Image (tube, rainbow, N blue to C red):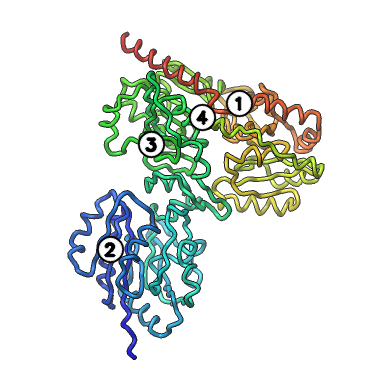
Amino acid sequence: MEKKEISFTVIMPTYNQCMYIRRAINSLFAQTYANWELIIVNDGCTDLTEDFIQDYLQDERVSYIKYTPNQGLGYALNQALDKAKNNYIAYLPSDDYYYEEHLQIIKERFKQSEDQILLYTNASSQIIDSYQYNKNHTIAGLFAGLGLQLVQVAHKKTVDRWIERSQWVTKDLFQMFWHKLTGYGSFLHIDQETCSWTIHLTQRHKQIDDKHNGGLNIYRSYYQVKEPLKMRVSAINFVNEEEIYQSFRAIYPVKEDALKILIVGELAYNPERIYALEQAGHKLYGLWIPKPNANFFTVGPLPFGHITDISREYWEEEIRQIKPDIIYGLLNYQAIEWTYLVAQKFPEIPLVWHFKEGPMVAQRYGTWDKLLSLYHLADGNIYLNPEIKEWYEQFVSPRGLSFVMDGDLPKADYFTDDFSPRLSETDGEIHTVAPGRLVGVGFKDLAILASRKVHVHLYVENYLEHKKGFIEGAFNATPDHFHLHTRCSPKEWVKEFSQYDAGWLHCFDSTNHGSLRKASWDDLNMPARMNTLAATGLPMIQKDNSKHIVAMQSHVKKRDIGIFFKSYEDLADQLYDNERLKQLQQNVLMSRMDFAFDTYVVPLIQFFREVIHYKKQSIKK
């Protein structure tokens, strides 16, 4: 009996790659093997994709699926699989391309054996020119750390389907689909280069992978995802926003005297704090920075609350229609230019400027002048602490009102009472915790602490790849006293972190000798982890910089909730002073609500109202 001719359904998922897509389609049309159909899946494109492909849609071999909004790669591929007519599936993402004999080579190999379910070729992935060189390395056709990519793969059609965004998100295509085929037959590597996997900034895996500065917020912003996400953000961290934010979705009635607050910029860490303003009966709008370049810059669409997002295309017109009572610009360096632009366009609307990181970054990125202009022009400025207020006043004399409040304060909902027994009560040794990074502590320092039976527990939040060297070195230096943990959800902060005795702030040696002019960002910063440690009742460890101006030391010392050390031997001695440690722990519990955003909602709204009044009076003058 004659075997059925091999025919391919080539699936082309596309999202805003109009400047690549014609090359991809042309590469398919140029194939030496012509028994194929093409299904283009427009996954909610907002660019000129449809204009660029119109002439190809007239070809009877080409089918077109279009929908909005973007639903993600898995959904797009499944839509095409449901419509595939042929018995073999190949993939051609719109930013990649085939060499002329790609399908011919794969077809010939499939004909040689019935046992093969999936074939993959070598794919080129490099940039070579006189300015730069970039290459994704492969081993036996597999891309290092990334595995098989769509463009290099073809397989027999089965009933199986790709994991979709509604289930969870990962960069790993093996977890998304390839593993489902392993029970049908073998995977065969064809050691011939037949296609190209294009390197560029908006590749999907780069929106997800923290190695490439991707993550939840980068992915959400790029694909404009409105629903809570479940995402594998690194090898050890999985984030479930449905679970984290389930308590922050109720709709609260807008009060009669509600403020219409236009948030401009991004929310950074603990973004759900802003929901407290909705709970207080105010109406929020969001005009977010277009392309966040750090994965902790939280932008809309938000997975909590009911903030109305303003479009990036028609924001001026929409602001005029909304007529906000106040503009609240925040929080980090990427918000500077965006807030400045909005303030220039709408000088009649009262502006409150709330800035955190960082003035030195603004100097480096060339936005220093606009940063100081915002402090000068704002009708109200919110400062992280008194020290940084005085520091800015070296450069500019603000004309508006002022308020002091940290920028990353968490919701009070996380300040629970589900405390755990301390590990030290069981083994008699001290256990400390660093949520995020262990700043300023070296391997020799860890060894000293280990010799004094002090443990360090590190919870990795972001950028795992960048921390691997330190983590490996820490394990080598103190294998029994350094412990690595996955990300801890805010809902579990108290239960998880309260088992430790104290927590680490940033450790550094200040050199300002009491002069604000010499102050660095370390001297002025209020690390977000300070609020996390306060929520969990833990005294805060930092170096003793009492002869210098250090904002976080002043903040902690004022409440008597810190351990300030001169050497690591001194730190161990203080940690083993049980009576003093218990007093510090009690002090943290007594003052911990100072570190919750909800504590500031009433005075913050009052500040907004005072700023609005101030603006009206200024206009009259």
Tell me the distance, in whole angstroms, between the alpha carbons under discs 3 and 1.
Answer: 29 Å
Query: Dividing the picture into quarters, in which one does residue 30 lie?
Result: bottom left
Which residue is drawn at the image coordinates 31% and 38% (left, top)? 312
Q: Looking at the image, is mark 3 or mark 1 earlier in the sequence?
A: 3
Up the image or down, 118 lies above or below 596; here it is below
Q: Looking at the image, is mark 3 or mark 2 earlier in the sequence?
A: 2
Closer to us: 422 or 429: 422
Q: Which mark lies nearer to you, 3 or 1?
A: 1
Question: In the rendered view, does 125 fall on the left or right side of 16?
Answer: right
Q: Looking at the image, is mark 1 or mark 2 earlier in the sequence?
A: 2
Tell me the distance, in whole angstroms, between the alpha carbons under discs 4 and 2.
Answer: 46 Å
Q: Which mark lies nearer to you, 1 or 2?
A: 1
Question: In the rendered view, does 290 fall on the left or right side of 236?
Answer: left
Question: In the rendered view, does 292 fall on the left or right side of 85?
Answer: right
**Residue under pointer 3:** 288
The disc at residue 593 is 1
Q: Residue furthest bottom?
A: 1
Kind of residue at badge 3: Trp
Percent across and percent down for residue 470 are 64, 50
**Residue under pointer 4:** 407
- Which SS class for mark 4? loop
Kind of residue at badge 4: Gly
Kind of residue at badge 1: Met
- Which SS class for mark 1? helix
